[in-house]
Image (cartoon, rainbow, N blue to C red):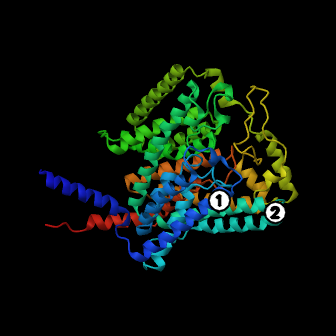
Amino acid sequence: MTRKSTNMNLQKTWKRILSFPLEGMNGKTFGIISILYVLSILTAYYFAYTSPNKSWKVLPIPLDIIVIAVGILLFFVAIKIFQKPERGIFVIAFFLPFERIGSLYHYLPINIRISQIMLLVTFFAALYQFLVLKKKVYKLKKDYAVFFLIIFSCVLLLSLTNAADKVRSIEVLLFDLFAFFSYVVLTSLLNTKEILQKTIWVILTISFILGLYSIYQFIGGTIGIPLGFLGLRYGYSNAFFYHIPRVQGTGLEPLYWGNYLLIPLAISFSLLLSSLGEKKIHLTKQTALALGTGMVCLLSIFFSFSRGAWYASSFTLALILFLYFIKRMLTIKAVVLSFLIGISLAIIAILIIIITKAPVTQSLFVNRATAIQDQSGRQINTPKAISLFKTNELLGIGVGGFGTQVKEPTTTNNTKTNEPASPLNENNTQFATVSNQYIEILAETGILGIASFVLFLLVVIFNAFKALFMVKDPYLRTIMIALFAATGGILLQYISFSTIYIMHIWFIFALLSATSYNITHHIWDQKAKRYENKPKAH
């Protein structure tokens, strides 16, 4: 290859890199996105400089540079989403775990996540494709779960009449409605098996990377690396909890981080069981990624020392084994190999503890896993929530009302195990929670609220269970088992925390519902059948 041809190839490559974000973009679309970009920059400036939380002032990089850099990046991402709105699902899946680190937590008066911004971009991209380009990229499905979700939303609105703090209640209501909105948008856009496959790849990849990062948090927190280089909140450093750091990854708290990891853990374990059960095991990229992601997820959940995450992950894995058993997909070889992987994982965890000299003992682990009481205030707040429910059994005390009506501190020392109290959050403010989603819904929205929410869940679970016994495609069967088990684990862990509008929870609800719908209505099966029956060219 001559020097001239090399220079020409470099020029073409450079031109390709520069033109990639604008590829296939017409002038009208570019103009609309440019206006949205400018408005988003102005909005970011306004909230950042008027926010009572001025933590951005201590950043080593000026806020102007951060806002502009992130804005430019999201601008190009938005362009690609406007070209194909289904790309928004992949971007949302990528940003799902960025709940604290990677969000606008430090710069705005409320915690806005990039995944939420990208959901709005995806929605407007689909709307633009439909209204301007006359392309229908979405499909509103006949989902009875949405019917009960609408009823639940109406109950939330009615409960405002009983709210003591209307501002707080409206704020919580808007976040709840946005979460419900995300469910409808995602189920409408997830229309092909290819979109599902790419979404799974994104979830596994980002979870593997962030899982390694969370293990680094434990190692670094144990050996004394400054918190600024770890991303740990002070309350989860080795200054608390028996001088053991509790990993939180990019999540707001260890329990939320562990809850998110149930999704990649279930997907990884299901893919591994399917791969290990084959007569001849092939170490494909998917199998290797599932193995790596599953191992770092389990290690991260263990080092989170979140009792709820421990219980939920155990339930999730057991449910996957049970579903594989009743579907006659479970082989002795897969069980034995999974057991060996589990032993290897335990050895790695023990080696990490020994090398870092972390004060983790067997008695501490047993006490943590089996203690009935804890420092989160569940034993105190549950009776209070029941008492508040009895004051208005039909509509409750108003959405978001428990935290405003229970004024006393919710952090207490555990006299049984002498665990230190959980600290307040970094802004030194805290709304009390029941730490049980179902009881909190009962207290805040009454019988009508809990009934409509449970009916929504039952419809989602029923449709998924029906799809499990109808699916023929091996890959879809494997993913359906994973999504079903992850949902079960998340719903189980809901008895240990209470925040209804968490994005990754509604994302998994949407994935499960959309996949179930396309299986039970034979949409993807029919497409596969037409492709298989297509006459081959001679």
Q: Residue at x 75, y 35 (%)?
A: 375
Rendered residue at 71%/59% (across/down): 172
| Residue 338 % position (x, y) | 43, 34
Q: Which residue is mark 1?
A: 47
Amino acid carrying label 1: it is Phe
x, y percentage for residue 241? Answer: 68, 29
Residue with the mark numbered 2: 394
Disc 2, SS? loop
10 Å neighbourhood of mark 1: few (<14), some, or many (≥20)?
A: some
Could you tell which of marks 1 and 2 lies nearer the N-terminus?
1
Q: Nearer the viewer, residue 230 or 187?
A: 230
Residue placed most toward the observer, 419 or 310? 419
Q: Position of residue 93 (x, y in %)?
A: 49, 54
Q: Secondary structure at mark 1?
A: helix
Residue type, label 2: Leu
Q: Quadrant of residue 164?
A: bottom right
Q: Is residue 92 above or below residue 147?
A: above
Residue 430 against residue 526 in the figure, above or below: above
Left/right placement of residue 315 relative to residue 414 reads: left
- Where does residue 358 sit, x and y in percent of width and height? 58, 22
Q: Is residue 50 visible?
A: yes
